[in-house]
Image: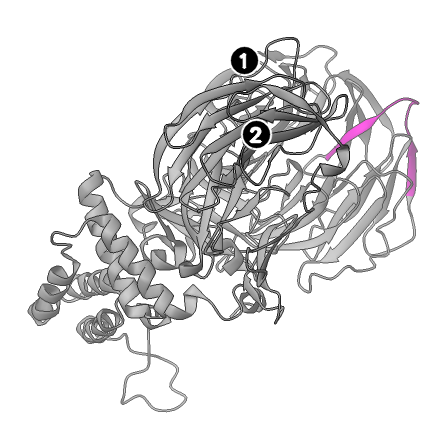
């Protein structure tokens, strides 16, 4: 078990309840025969029918533990492995078909039965109910269960947590939706509400706990019945139009008797307004006159007859709930002081603590963590990316962290270092034993085997480094705005300093594949140097440099790309097509294809010899980096996530790290398969869900449907699509 698993739930752990339903399927292995002697060098393959027999026993165990779907899949695999003995599966196959049949029960009823079984600690009953619920939901919806990935912005806001009055439910704002976690689920997420068209800004439970309200910044407010979690009303608090550029809904408050809801807008001193609504009917009551600029949330009097709100400019005002009339101004001392990041449950026994990674539920008396913080998906832009020369490891600089990805089996991701400034460049040494990264504060090197920072004699840190790169002969080049330091990784002698023109403002550095030429880009120009002499070859217009393996150079000049011979005064081809600035360029290893990415959210491939477009593909976000794999068949783009593409323009895999942990996941674009990555991988698994219609399931309960270990390495190895299914 990964070390972080022990902190996930500390006692109330869903994974523990499904342990009886889990277990690795029997693999196709080569094992010694019973008659083989000790020390025999050769091993006999296991008879397929013998493996099938073992899988049928395993399927029976899954069925007994409530894992009906997993038992069914295992049984099907056994029958396919040995068709001559498929009749032996008949009785169990019929039993599973019968048990999975939902009968007259609805998907929602079976789902709630699973939740009740979980609350009782009955793992087999829980898994059985959820498997049946999925079958029922697929029939009702006419769709299949799907893997639900957390959006990059899936992070709980500091003040976005409220408890139900009985402490059984905690609601959390997740940007354009709301997560509902229930005590019966061990405070794991039970459902999501939304999505809204704009970010959710405020949430609230009615005092009796029967109604839940959520409001988005665009003024949309929805009410749900908490018994069924069905939406029963939706209305809009119209935003003020009088030159209020940042007016947005930011507060919802129920009256003590639960009959009235007040909605409030106003941000940063730009005005705002308040409106009263009838909760039972979902209809408008009154608009309350007076500004509410930058004040605290509105409050009601205990008898629900008056409502108060504050303003930086106007102090605290009082209105009649019945008529909406302004009654006067009350002393500012009555203004409430909301808590900052710690939200106690109504009985005081639990606390919801918000932080940069999400929300933790803690027992006050024992300090026991009932539910760990929600894993925050990395949402920082990738600022640097470099593939090792063998194509098996990927270095990524994102936000203020450097990460090392392994693309072999098993794939993993590790956070190597964190800084106060953004990582601007990363590079592998030619022997792949060292990874170097730089920020404006300096250069750090790590061992790629021990993952520890190391002292490499040739890794120097000039003042204000902007970019770095390794040449095949172990020469490390580190650029600043004033100079380039050239040194050997294994020795501290023979370092060379190349001065640069004043005002160079270097932001990119590239070395040719043979290490014979150095290119520096910045301030709209690219400077070229011969190595090892350091002699300047001149400069060309443009930035975003790439050397062509067969000779030549590509530079980006705004939306245009120029292909030139190294000694030519004018570009040989000018490539047009991007609608916004080009951010990165890369040639295929054979020099035949040029890849370009830009702020226009496109990946484009070009014929490098003819200067003609080959294809265009949309990326999910603006992309800042692109690189080809050594065989030239695949390429990687990096923006808010890493995307693996075929040379034919097919998106094959998406890789996403988590913000704070050495964890992440790789997923096929259609969501049919996922691989959990990293030593903290179970945190990544906890961030995933499975969904069909309105029913959302923890990943542990549908893991066998989607998880495929070795997905990354299989894809890189050229596996066909039918080999990339769980």
Q: CA distance from mark 1 to mark 2?
A: 20 Å
Residue 499's spot in the image, x, y percent?
93, 30
In this rendering, the answer to whether 316 lies above or below 238 is below
Residue 650's spot in the image, x, y percent?
41, 32
Specify whether residue 587 is in view.
no
What residue is rendered at 54% in x and 13% in y? 577
Which of 13 and 715 lies nearest the eye of the viewer? Answer: 13
* Residue at the disc numbered 2: 591
What residue is rendered at 37% in x and 43% in y? 671
Q: Which mark is residue 577?
A: 1
Residue 546 falls left or right of residue 527: left
Q: Quadrant of residue 536?
A: top right
Membership of 558 in magenta stretch: no
Q: Nearer the viewer, mark 1 or mark 2?
A: 1
What residue is rendered at 84% in x and 25% in y? 505
Q: Give, as a single range, the part of the protein colored magenta.
A: 496-510
């Amino acid at each position: 078990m990964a070390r972080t698993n022990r902190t996930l739930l500390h006692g109330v752990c869903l994974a523990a309840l499904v342990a009886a339903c889990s277990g690795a399927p029997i693999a196709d292995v080569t094992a010694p025969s019973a008659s083989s002697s000790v020390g025999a060098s050769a091993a006999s393959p296991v008879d397929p029918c013998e493996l099938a027999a073992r899988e049928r026993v395993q399927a029976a165990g899954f069925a007994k533990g409530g894992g009906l779907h997993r038992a069914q899949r295992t049984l099907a695999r056994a029958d396919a492995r040995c068709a001559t003995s498929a009749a032996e599966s008949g009785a169990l196959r019929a039993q599973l078909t019968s048990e999975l049949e939902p009968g007259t029960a609805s998907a929602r009823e079976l789902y709630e039965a699973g939740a009740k079984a979980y609350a009782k600690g009955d793992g087999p009953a829980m898994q059985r109910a959820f498997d049946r619920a999925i079958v029922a939901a697929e029939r009702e919806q006419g769709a299949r269960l799907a893997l639900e990935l957390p959006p990059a912005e899936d992070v709980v806001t500091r003040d976005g947590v409220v408890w139900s009055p009985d402490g059984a439910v905690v609601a959390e704002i997740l940007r354009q939706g709301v997560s509902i976690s229930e005590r019966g689920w061990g405070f794991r997420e039970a459902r999501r509400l939304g999505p809204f068209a704009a970010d959710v800004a405020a949430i609230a439970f009615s005092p009796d706990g029967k109604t839940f309200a959520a409001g988005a910044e665009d003024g949309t407010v929805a009410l749900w019945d908490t018994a069924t979690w069905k939406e029963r009303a939706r209305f809009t608090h119209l935003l003020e139009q009088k030159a209020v550029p940042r007016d947005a809904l930011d507060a919802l408050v129920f009256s003590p008797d639960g009959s009235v809801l007040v909605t409030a807008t106003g941000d940063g001193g730009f005005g705002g307004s308040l409106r009263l609504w009838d909760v039972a009917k979902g209809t408008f009551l009154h608009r309350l006159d007076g500004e509410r600029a930058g004040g605290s949330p509105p409050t009601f009097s205990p008898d629900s007859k008056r409502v108060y709100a504050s303003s930086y400019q106007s102090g605290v005002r009082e209105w009649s709930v019945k008529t909406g009339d302004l009654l006067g101004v009350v002393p500012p001392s009555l203004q409430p002081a909301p808590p900052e990041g710690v939200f106690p449950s109504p009985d005081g026994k639990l606390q919801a603590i918000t932080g940069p990674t999400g929300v933790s539920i803690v027992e006050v008396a024992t300090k026991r963590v009932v539910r760990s913080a929600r894993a925050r998906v990395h949402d920082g832009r990738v600022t640097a990316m470099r593939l090792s020369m063998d194509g098996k490891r990927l270095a990524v600089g994102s936000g203020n962290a450097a990460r090392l990805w392994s693309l072999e089996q098993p794939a993993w991701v590790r956070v190597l270092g964190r800084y106060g400034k953004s990582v601007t460049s990363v590079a592998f040494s030619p022997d792949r034993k060292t990874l170097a990264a730089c920020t404006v504060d300096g250069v750090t090197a790590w061992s790629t085997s021990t993952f520890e920072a190391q002292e490499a004699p040739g890794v120097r840190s000039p003042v204000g480094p902007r970019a770095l790169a390794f040449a095949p002969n172990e020469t490390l080049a580190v650029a600043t705005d004033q100079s380039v330091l050239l040194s050997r990784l294994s020795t501290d002698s023979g370092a060379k300093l190349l001065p640069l023109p004043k005002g160079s403002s270097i932001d990119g550095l590239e070395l040719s594949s043979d290490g014979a030429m150095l290119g520096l880009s910045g301030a709209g120009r690219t400077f070229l140097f011969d190595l090892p002499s350091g002699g300047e070859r001149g400069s060309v217009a443009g930035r975003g440099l790439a050397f062509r393996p067969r000779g030549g150079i590509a530079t980006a000049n705004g939306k245009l790309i120029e292909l030139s011979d190294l000694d030519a005064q004018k570009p040989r081809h000018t490539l047009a097509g991007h609608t916004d600035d080009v951010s990165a360029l890369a040639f295929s290893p054979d020099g035949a294809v040029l890849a370009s990415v830009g702020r226009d959210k496109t990946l484009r491939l070009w014929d490098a010899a003819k200067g003609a477009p080959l294809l265009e593909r949309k990326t999910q976000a603006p992309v800042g980096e692109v690189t080809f794999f050594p065989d030239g068949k695949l390429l990687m783009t990096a923006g808010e996530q890493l995307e693996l593409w075929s040379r034919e323009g097919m998106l094959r895999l998406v890789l996403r790290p988590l913000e704070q942990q050495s964890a992440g996941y790789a997923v096929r674009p259609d969501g049919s398969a996922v691989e959990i990555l990293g030593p903290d991988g179970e945190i990544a698994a906890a961030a995933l869900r499975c969904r069909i219609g309105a029913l959302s399931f923890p990943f542990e309960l549908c893991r066998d449907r989607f998880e495929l270990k070795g997905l990354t390495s299989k894809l890189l190895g050229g596996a066909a699509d039918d080999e990339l299914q769980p």
